[in-house]
Amino acid sequence: MKTPIHIAAGIVFDQSESVFITKRLAHQTYAGYWEFPGGKVELGETSESALSRELFEELDIRVRELQHYLTVDYYDAGKKLVLDFFLILSYLGYPKGAEGQLGKWVPIEQLTDENSTFVFPNANREVIWKLALDKESIWRR
């Protein structure tokens, strides 16, 4: 099997129990799907440093504090993906789609609603349900 593709993604949340999600651009895999912002971990990077770089590039925020939340191993079209999800506990700036992508603050309940218009790649399903279960403890931080 090929080397896994390692991805770091950030869960940016606010005091109103919402998370900031972005919509993938037309030229990207899973174009039009929603996602937790982040990207590939490059050679020589840690997940944390890759995520800090990606969130600055994608959202124009500077991560001050983050905490590992969940690792998901996912197989897609013969590729193994390893997704490290982090809670973004503190940052400077205000999140926006800095690369032209749409970004929105969305309550977690809207992501787990079966009638939701926010469609994520299947690799995100586990983290979305975990966020819904852990919602109260996350927002009490």
Image: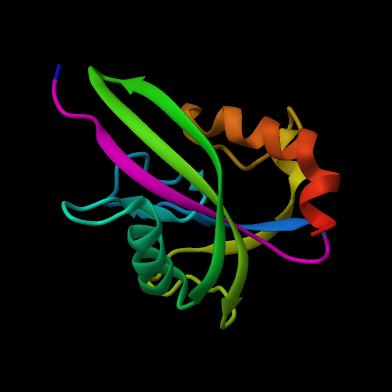
Specify whether residue 109 is in view: no
Q: Is residue 29 left or right of residue 93?
A: left
- Which sits in the foreground, 66 or 37? 66
Residue 34: percent from left, percent from top: 52, 46
* Image quarter hosting the N terminus: top left
Return the x and y of residue 41 as percentages of the image width and height.
Answer: 27, 50
Residue 62: image location, x then y, percent: 48, 77
Seen at 56% across and 37% down, the residue is 119
Q: Main secondary structure of the magenta part?
A: strand
- Given residues 136 and 116, the one toward you in this image is 136
The tally of labels here is: 0
Q: Quadrant of residue 67?
A: bottom right
Colouring method of the image: rainbow
134 vs 123, left or right, is right
Identified at 56% across, 83% down, the residue is: 93
- Magenta segment, which residues? 2-16
Q: Quadrant of residue 44?
A: bottom left
Tell which of 115 and 46 is nearer to you. Answer: 46
Q: Is residue 9 found inside the magenta-colored segment of the image? A: yes
> In the rendered view, would you say 16 is above or below 119?
below
The percent coordinates of residue 56 (x first, y second) are 40, 73
Kindly give the residue lying farthest to the bottom in the view shown: 93
- Residue 75 in sight: yes
Q: Is residue 57 above or below residue 13?
A: below
In reply to whether residue 105 is colored magenta, the answer given is: no
Residue at 36% of width from left, 51% of height from top?
Answer: 47
Would residue 132 be found to the left or right of residue 71 on screen?
right
Point out the image quarter for the C terminus.
bottom right
